[in-house]
Image: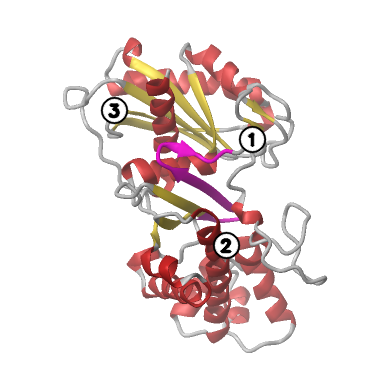
């Protein structure tokens, strides 16, 4: 189902204005927002990563100009552009280091090249931090002073916001919470990064598929083989459908993901003591809109209650994010706004 977006007119908007760019491996989302985070325009263009970072930077620059045109405001009204990007990076230098999903983009000065093509100053951020800031600014975390956002998908992204500060770290590797170590056993599952025992190895979509395949190989009773025989793909979505239809194995795997997420969340509660933890991304099992999503969230909270300091467990808010796929570009615009106000 397509996400429904509502826009305000330039007449209704409050200056200054900001543009958010959310760079993904497949698509680049671009939008103009006003000083209150209300969108005036939005568009998406293909990343076409195989053409290289210079080509993508040029098209991002053009997309920014197009979004400004569609917002019906003058380019001079834009205070700053925010760019959220995946992969390892050097944020102060505005440089991608070795982005796994963007092959051949290593050591590219993306912030300055996008700035060159759009003719505007650009603030640079990790995509997880951008999404977290979006939820903090105008999403599910807007009533809180601090939050952690986990994005559950192929891997596990994360962003930590305290006040207006994104926790980026001294080496631009802050908030890599998908790589919290939750199992130090010799036979711990191996993460996509190559290390073992990380949260991502137990609670990502990749982990769900691997766990389901192992159960199938072991001959455990489940309705999954019937669905696979019909041509369905083994995926978290399929497991969710089968769990909702009563398949015990599928439900067991999903609730085990929730248990591990609870363990990861407790590690963060005992480290930074945030106001709230939000869960977003493609693998939230329907969120608050489905019984399965609510059960997933309840299982996480049960694990937190069991393992965290009682005061923290009592006061923490754990819920689903609300901005969906728009969190990245909205948060990138919000980070640009913060940088603009500080300078």
Relative image position of residue 50 (x, y in whole percent): 68, 32
Residue located 40% across and 30% down the image: 333
Q: Residue furthest right?
A: 186
> Split into 4 quadrants, where in the image is the N terminus?
bottom left
Is residue 71 toward the left or the right of residue 105 in the image?
Answer: left
Please say if 203 is above or below 68: below
User: Disc 3 vs disc 2: which is toward the camera?
Assistant: 2
CB of mark 3 within 8 Å of CB of mark 2? no
Magenta span of residues: 151-168
Please say if 239 is above or below 33: below
> Split into 4 quadrants, where in the image is the C terminus?
top left
- Residue named by callout 1: 170
The span from disc 1 to disc 2 (Cα, nearest Å) is 21 Å
Residue 155 seen in the figure: no
- Residue named by callout 3: 35
- Residue named by callout 2: 267
Magenta segment: does it hold 153? yes
Residue 145 seen in the figure: yes
Which badge, 1 or 3, is on the more N-terminal residue?
3
Magenta segment: does it hold 87? no
Nearer to us in this view, 143 or 69: 143
Residue located 64% across and 62% down the image: 199
Residue located 61% across and 32% down the image: 48
CB of mark 1 within 8 Å of CB of mark 3? no
> What main secondary structure does the magenta stretch of the protein show?
strand
Tell me the quarter of the picture where residue 189 sits. Answer: bottom right
């Amino acid at each position: 189902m397509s996400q429904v977006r509502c826009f305000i007119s330039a007449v209704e908007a409050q200056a200054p204005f900001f543009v958010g760019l959310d760079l993904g491996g497949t698509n680049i989302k671009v939008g103009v927002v006003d000083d209150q985070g209300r969108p005036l325009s939005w568009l998406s263009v293909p990343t076409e990563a195989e053409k290289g970072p210079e080509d993508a930077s040029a098209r991002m620059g053009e997309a920014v100009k197009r979004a400004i045109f569609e917002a019906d405001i003058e380019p001079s009204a834009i205070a700053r552009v925010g760019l959220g990007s995946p992969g390892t990076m050097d944020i102060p230098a505005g440089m991608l280091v070795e982005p796994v999903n963007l092959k051949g983009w290593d050591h590219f000065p993306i912030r300055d090249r996008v700035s060159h093509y759009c003719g505007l100053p650009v603030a640079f951020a990790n995509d997880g931090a951008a999404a977290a800031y979006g939820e903090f600014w105008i999403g599910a975390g807007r009533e809180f002073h601090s939050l952690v956002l986990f994005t559950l998908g192929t891997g596990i992204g994360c962003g930590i916001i305290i006040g207006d500060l994104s926790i980026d770290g001294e080496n631009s590797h802050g908030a890599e919470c998908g790589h919290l170590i939750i199992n130090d056993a010799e036979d711990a599952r191996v993460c996509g990064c190559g290390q073992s025992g990380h949260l991502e190895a137990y609670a990502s979509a990749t982990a769900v598929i691997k766990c389901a395949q192992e159960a199938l190989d072991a001959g455990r009773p489940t309705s999954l083989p019937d669905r696979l025989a019909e041509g369905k793909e083994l995926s978290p979505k399929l497991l969710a459908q089968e769990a909702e239809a009563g398949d015990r194995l599928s439900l067991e795997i999903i609730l085990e993901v929730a248990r591990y997420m609870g363990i990861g969340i407790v590690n963060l509660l005992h480290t930074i003591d945030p106001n709230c933890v939000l869960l977003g991304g493609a693998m939230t099992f329907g969120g608050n809109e489905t019984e399965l999503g609510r059960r997933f969230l309840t299982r996480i909270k049960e694990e937190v209650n069991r393992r965290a300091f009682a005061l923290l467990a009592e006061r923490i808010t754990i819920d689903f994010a609300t901005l969906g796929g728009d969190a990245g570009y909205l948060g990138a615009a919000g980070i640009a706004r913060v940088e603009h106000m500080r300078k």
